[in-house]
């Protein structure tokens, strides 16, 4: 039986302001996270929508709530800008493909792995040459997660949440770890979700559970007040030294520089 190793821990990841680069490239161990505080982009939403193709613009009409429609325009446009920067593709002509679990990828650039997550006022995008999964969550004060525990966590994990002095934080920490890992695997949430490890430590994971013989790591990080995140990536724990996180600028000058010099 093949066994993969999985390392799980908290990672003190510092956010720095993004500055458009002369070149966008990724070494084999690089993982870059771009964070987007969606309300800050409201004033340039109309300009950002110009980067969407006709299929994406049609999709915006399916959102029942205007706030969800606006958020989609912002984070999808910025995702395309980021992908354009690394691939040199024309941003408007970037079309995302989806696997059977609806995980997006670029058929034209299979070496570029990326994942997007959004929750309330934040979105985040991770890019790497390694398989990667990202999950961010707003820690809602009104969400009653107690009923979910038996279906999502094993007995030990459930006990740790119930005994925690900050049950909400512990729940979201463990949830985002599981979610990021299954997104990296391209599994989606299924019957295996409960058996995905999520506590700090090193694990031996049955190959049949993850369908992958590679080693993995999952790192939790603080995103903002009341927001937690987790990133899962293929490779040994030492690769976590190559994770960086940037705030995306909310002005068209910097965003257009990204698009015009690298992605158009």
Image (tube, helix red, strand yellow):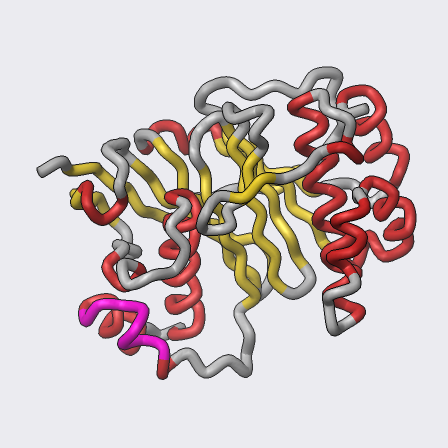
Which picture quadrant has residue 238? top left
Viewer-proximal residue, 162 or 210?
Answer: 210
Q: Is residue 180 magenta?
A: no
Quadrant where the N terminus lies? top left
Residue 219 locus on image (x, y percent): 40, 45
Left or right side of 130 for 140: right
The residue depicted at 63 percent of the width and 39 percent of the height is 96
Residue 216 locus on image (x, y percent): 31, 37
Left or right side of 114 for 238: left
State the residue lying farthest toward the left: 1
Magenta span covers which residues? 148-155
Residue 135 locus on image (x, y percent): 50, 53
Which picture quadrant has residue 68? bottom right
* Helix, strand or loop for the magenta stretch, by majority: helix
Viewer-proximal residue, 134 or 225?
Answer: 134
Residue 3 drawn above or below residue 186: above
Residue 36 drawn above or below residue 130: below
Which picture quadrant has residue 7? top left
Left or right side of 32 for 220: left
The residue depicted at 42 percent of the width and 43 percent of the height is 184
């Amino acid at each position: 039986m093949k066994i993969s190793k999985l390392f799980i821990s908290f990672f003190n990841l510092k956010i720095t302001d993004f500055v458009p680069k002369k070149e966008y490239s990724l070494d084999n161990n690089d993982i870059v996270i771009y964070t987007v505080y969606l309300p800050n982009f409201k004033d340039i939403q109309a300009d950002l929508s110009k980067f969407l193709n006709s299929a994406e613009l049609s999709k915006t009409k399916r959102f029942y709530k205007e706030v969800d429609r606006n958020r989609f325009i912002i984070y999808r446009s910025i995702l395309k800008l980021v992908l354009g920067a690394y691939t040199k593709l024309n941003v408007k002509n970037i079309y995302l493909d989806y696997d059977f679990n609806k995980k997006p990828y670029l058929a034209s650039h299979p070496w570029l792995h990326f994942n997007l997550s959004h929750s309330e006022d934040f979105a985040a995008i991770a890019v790497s040459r390694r398989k990667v999964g990202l999950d961010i969550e707003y820690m809602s004060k009104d969400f009653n997660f107690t009923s979910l525990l038996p279906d999502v966590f094993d007995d030990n994990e459930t006990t740790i949440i119930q005994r925690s002095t900050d049950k909400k934080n512990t729940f979201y920490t463990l949830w985002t770890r599981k979610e990021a890992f299954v997104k990296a695997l391209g599994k989606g949430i299924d019957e295996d979700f409960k058996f995905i490890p999520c506590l700090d430590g090193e694990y031996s994971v049955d190959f049949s559970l993850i369908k992958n013989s590679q080693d993995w790591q999952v790192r939790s990080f603080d995103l903002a007040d009341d927001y937690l995140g987790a990133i899962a990536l293929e490779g040994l724990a030492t690769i976590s030294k190559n994770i960086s996180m940037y705030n995306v600028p909310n002005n068209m000058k910097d965003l257009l520089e990204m698009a015009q010099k690298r992605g158009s």
